[in-house]
Image: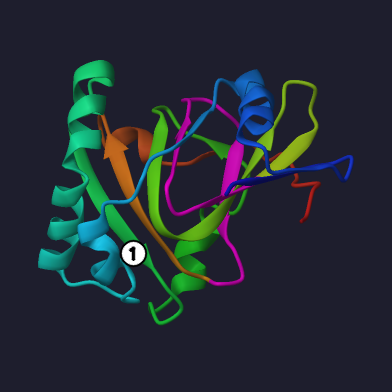
Amino acid sequence: MAILHTQKNEIHTDLFTIQRILSLLDVQLNHWPIAKESEALLSKPSLKDHEKTMILSSHQHYFETLKKSEGYQSQDLIVLHPEIPNLEALLEKFASIHTHDDNEVRYIVDGEGTFGFVLPDGSQILLTVVAGEFINVPAHTEHWFVLTQTKRIKAVRYFTTTDGWSPNYTNRLIEITA
């Protein structure tokens, strides 16, 4: 279940309320069921390439829907966990406020992470997403991403192009913490 924190120390767990707040940025958040046949693989901390392919295949219907409706061309599965060498350095480039030239689209299949967003009035919110949640952050939306204390996430990423995933830093300071 997603959890949204505001700078006014409000905490929201109701999907409808969270979606309403995210609509200020055109960010989409939905719940998609995890394929039962993936559960055993998803419980493993790391995955081999053929296991990643199996997970992607078991969720292929989501990709086909996005391909038809939004023009997505490719997908991959990112697997992050504490044993990955240089994990902190890898995550550091997304921990500052930035935008992308393309939508950032993820379907969380295991673990959790937190997106921070800058609202139109300049205030900031934190959204923790967990397994089963699909998020679409529109291009040019000021945001950042960090792992939670579990330091573990598996997420299917959907791409129209790979060019848009380079961060464009805004130099705005993060003013909110959970």
Q: Which residue is mark 1?
A: 79
Horizontal side of 48 relative to 18 (left or right) equals left
The quarter in which the C terminus is drawn is bottom right
Image height of 158 relative to 25, above or below: below
Q: SS at mark 1?
A: strand
Q: Please tell me which residue is depicted at 66% across the width and 23% down the height of the picture.
A: 20
Image height of 38 relative to 66, above or below: below
Q: Which residues are magenta?
A: 127-150
Task: Name the one closer to the observer, 54 or 15.
Answer: 15
Image height of 73 relative to 53, above or below: above
Residue 107 pos. (x, y %): 38, 44
Answer whether residue 61 is magenta in the image. Answer: no
Task: Name the one closer to the observer, 28 or 25.
Answer: 28
Q: Please tell me which residue is depicted at 49% across the width and 61% down the height of the picture.
A: 91
The amino acid type of the residue labelled 1 equals: Val
Horizontal side of 131 relative to 172 (left or right) equals left
Q: Please tell me which residue is depicted at 48% across the width and 25% down the height of the picture.
A: 138
Q: Please tell me which residue is depicted at 43% across the width and 76% down the height of the picture.
A: 86
Q: Residue furthest left?
A: 50
